[in-house]
Image: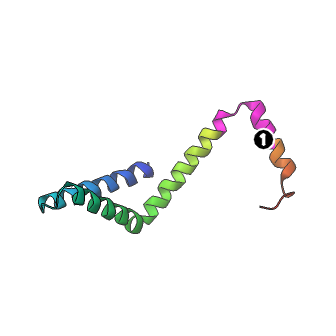
Amino acid sequence: MRFLLYGLIRIVVFVGVWYLCMAMDLGMVLSVLVALILSFAVGYLGLRRLRDGATEDMAAWRRGVTRNRRGRTEQADADAEDAYTEGRFRS
């Protein structure tokens, strides 16, 4: 949910800035570039907590997708390998 909200806010900022630049008659290319830069800056600097939450949501979703792709035998093998190598190698 936070991923969708973060994306929606960035899109709204982009469209708003683009519209203002077009209203100031800056031209299409310059308006798009200014809108891209400002929407990135707002997303990076102003929405840190929401961005971090969106990242956590995507990581949790990704873990669920990869875990569900394995069958029971594959998951059991992976768990056995993880238990065997636990503490044996340094990262």
Q: Name the side, left or right, on which 64 lies relative to 70.
A: left
Instruction: Look at 45% across and 64% down and name the residue there.
Output: 49
As displayed, is residue 82 above or below residue 38? above
Q: Which one is in front, 39 or 26?
A: 26
Q: Name the side, left or right, on which 40 lies relative to 65.
A: left
Q: Which residue is label 1 attached to? A: 78
Q: Magenta stretch containing residue 78, yes or no?
A: yes
Instruction: Look at 22% across and 59% down and name the residue there.
Output: 31
Instruction: Look at 33% across and 63% down and name the residue there.
Output: 37
| Amino acid on which the number 1 mark rests in the picture | Ala
Numbered disc 1: secondary structure: helix
Q: Which one is in front, 27 or 76?
A: 27
Q: Residues within 10 Å of mark 1 (few under 14, many from 20)?
A: few
As displayed, is residue 28 above or below residue 76? below
Q: Which one is in front, 2 or 25?
A: 25
Q: Main secondary structure of the magenta part?
A: helix
Q: Name the side, left or right, on which 50 lies relative to 68.
A: left
Q: Position of residue 20 (x, y in %)?
A: 17, 60
Q: Position of residue 36 (x, y in %)?
A: 32, 59
Tag count: 1
Q: Position of residue 5 (x, y in %)?
A: 38, 52
The colouring scheme, among rainbow, by chain, secondary structure or one colour, is rainbow
Instruction: Look at 75% across and 37% down and name the residue there.
Output: 75
Q: Magenta stretch containing residue 72, yes or no?
A: yes
Q: Position of residue 45 (x, y in %)?
A: 40, 69
Q: Which one is in front, 89 or 56?
A: 89
The quarter of the displayed image where residue 91 is located: bottom right
The quarter of the displayed image where residue 28 is located: bottom left
The quarter of the displayed image where residue 32 is located: bottom left
Magenta span covers which residues?
67-79
